[in-house]
Amino acid sequence: MSMHAPFATTSRSGFLVGYLESLSLVERLHRLLLDVIKDEFERLGILDINAVQALLLFNIGEHEVTAGELKTRGYYQGSNVSYNLKKLVETGYMHHQRCEIDRRSVRVRLTEKGRNVRDIVGKLFVRHAEGLEKNGVLNLDALDRISHSLKRIERYWSDQIRYIY
């Protein structure tokens, strides 16, 4: 994101510039995370799953959930959840089963193949965490401050959706 002239007139333009830079960084970090996951799977020769799907499997873990719960629990952030679930079932990474109570609802859980992917992503994240700490990129206190700030932004944005619109 770049600073647009109409927004520069605010008395808090320095804050606005920092805010826009932060938004851009969050977006870039998410794309970079997906690239890192994709590279790991290419390195391992696992080509029938994409990074979004691998991250979804990691986030689901041992839970059994409905498609709707994927978003409400924060396991999936994209808009095409049904496409990715269908692909994961077709490629054998997930089981799906109609709910006994509500036949319209489908519950999903990982297969052994899906749990293997979850473990690969988990090990990748462990390596990253160890490397960030070992190389002095982040310590626990800095990570706590980042997480706290991001949660406050998340809460603020959620409130904007709920109460303003």
Image (tube, rainbow, N blue to C red):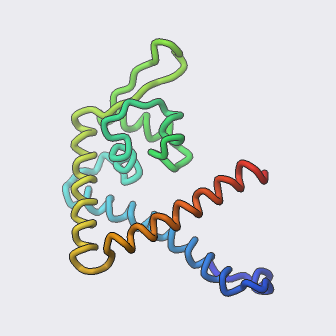
Closest to the observer, 49 or 143: 143
The percent coordinates of residue 163 (x first, y second) are: 76, 50
At 37% from the left and 50% from the top, the residue drawn is: 55
To which quarter of the image does residue 147 belong? bottom left
Q: In this view, does 5 lie to the left or right of 58?
A: right
Closest to the observer, 19 or 105: 19
At 34% from the left and 48% from the top, the residue drawn is: 54
Q: In this view, does 45 lie to the left or right of 68?
A: left
The percent coordinates of residue 154 (x first, y second) are: 58, 58
The percent coordinates of residue 44 (x first, y second) are: 19, 56
At 37% from the left and 54% from the top, the residue drawn is: 51
The percent coordinates of residue 14 (x first, y second) are: 67, 87
To which quarter of the image does residue 134 belong? bottom left
The quadrant of the image that shows the N terminus is bottom right
Judge whether 107 appears above or below 87 on screen: above
Label total for image = 0
Closest to the observer, 94 or 74: 74
At 33% from the left and 47% from the top, the residue drawn is: 58
Extreme residue in the front direction: 141
Closest to the observer, 2 or 14: 14
Judge whether 25 appears above or below 60 on screen: below
